[in-house]
Amino acid sequence: MKLKSIETFTNEAVGFVRVTMEDGAQGWGQVSTYNSDITCQVLHRQVAPWTLGQDTTDLDDLLDIVAEREHKFPGSYLRRAMAGLDTAIWDMRGKQQGKSVAELLGGSAGPIRAYASSMKRDITPAEEANRFKHLRDTQGFDAFKMRAGAEVGRNQDEWAGRTEEIIPTMRRELGDDVDLLIDANSCFTPERAIEVGHILQDNGFCHYEEPCPYWELEQTKQVTDRLDIDVTGGEQDCDLPTWKRMIDMRAVDIVQPDILYIGGISRTLRVVEMAMKANLPVTPHCANWSLVTLFTMHLLRAIPNAGKYLEFSIEGADYYPWQQDLYVNFPYDIENGQARVTEAPGWGVEINPEWLAKSIYQISEIH
């Protein structure tokens, strides 16, 4: 089936994509969040020319052609743009066949255990513990992720002693019946990361994310080899050869591709296959309420090596004001600590027409 047009509706934070095929079939997707207006320009300038008028049946091959034709631009923006096309085509396929994307991928509708993911570092350990306890008591979460160190912090903490304080505070305040995860966001040298890792192990944490600068795979592997806790990473990586190297060298224990950073569902499935051959679980990164979390829910309901949880951001309008009013019906309800994929065709979501009307609009099409 040939692609007739690509439309984008965007602001700086989030950009939705609508594809229309030659027979009139349509689907909705999304480019990656953050600087989405720039990403949509990349989509129209560097993805559309190689895909309009082309058959989309072999989506893997079509996306490879884009990457090859744009070989001078191997980085993140091109992949974030490709994701908009990919995810819209998956939605179109689901609507045509009357199936959810999860079902197209070999899975089904149903629940997914979620962990409550905090984005905040400017919060005291006591305040963070109170937020988590409220979520446990009101929405049934039984797994929680907080932040250590400072983001890409060169071994510096958000303030002196915060990391050493938050780790035992979380276990003491939340008890032994919950899973505790932590994200260092590329903060530490291997030596410091290992030191923090021992504190995490002593307090029964089970997931230690991106302890070292993510691009330094050898540093991360040093930490993985020295600790019993699962070391995780990969959210920033969009280059498939890097993924192969990461998995082959077992730099991490759990892989965390972001569907929109890597270039869409199809490219994520290639990482899933690499990880499956290496017996590694996949717990994707999806840290906001744009469509990326919905995409991840469908993926997790389908892949055989899905990790234990869905990442679910707990930050609302105070942290991400751009998340407001994106949808006709908000697709993220948590009940008993679980999210749920519906049987609705495609992604099963409708973008708010009022939001679309206020966005920056652009179309690339075959005339």
Image (cartoon, rainbow, N blue to C red):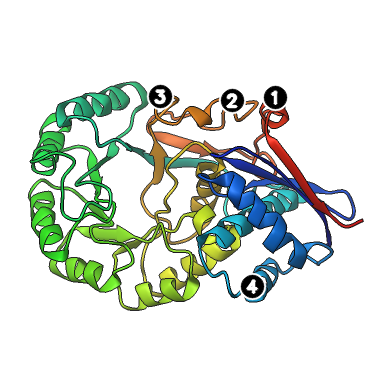
Nearest the viewer among 255 and 298 is 255
* Mark 4 and mark 2 residues within 8 Å of each other at the beta carbon: no
Apparent side of residue 190 relative to residue 359 in the rendered image (left or right): left
Nearer the observer: mark 3 or 4; the answer is 3
Q: x, y percentage for residue 342?
A: 60, 38
**Residue carrying label 3:** 318
**Amino acid on which disc 2 is placed:** Asp
On the image, numbered disc 1 is attached to which residue?
Answer: 354
Q: Determine the CA span between mark 3 and mark 4.
A: 39 Å
Residue depicted at x 33% and y 59% = 233
Identify the element where label 3 is drawn. Answer: loop
Q: The C terminus appears in which quarter of the rendering?
A: bottom right
Q: Earlier in the sequence, mark 4 or mark 2?
A: 4
Whether residue 56 is visible, yes or no, is: no
Identity, as a three-letter code, of the amino acid under mark 4: Asp
Around disc 1, counting alpha carbons within 10 Å, would you say few (fewer than 14), some (14 to 19), or many (20 or more)?
few
Mark 3 neighbour density, 10 Å: few (under 14) some (14–19) many (20 or more): few
Residue carrying label 4: 64
**Of the residues under marks 2 and 1, which one precedes in the sequence?**
2
Asked if the residue at tag 4 contacts the one at tag 3, i.e. Cβ–Cβ closer than 8 Å, the answer is no
Q: Do tag 2 and tag 1 residues touch (Cβ < 8 Å)?
A: yes
> How far apart are the alpha carbons under marks 4 and 1?
35 Å
| Looking at the image, residue 264 lies above or below residue 174 | below
Kind of residue at badge 3: Asp
Mark 1: which amino acid? Glu
Question: What is the CA distance from the residue labelled 3 to the residue labelled 2?
Answer: 14 Å
Which numbered disc flags the more N-terminal residue, 4 or 1?
Answer: 4
Please report the residue visible at 70 percent of the width from the left and 69 percent of the height from the top.
Answer: 62
Going 39% across and 54% down the picture, which residue do you hit?
283
| Mark carried by residue 325 | 2
Q: As displayed, is residue 282 above or below residue 222?
A: above
Circle 2 — which element?
A: loop
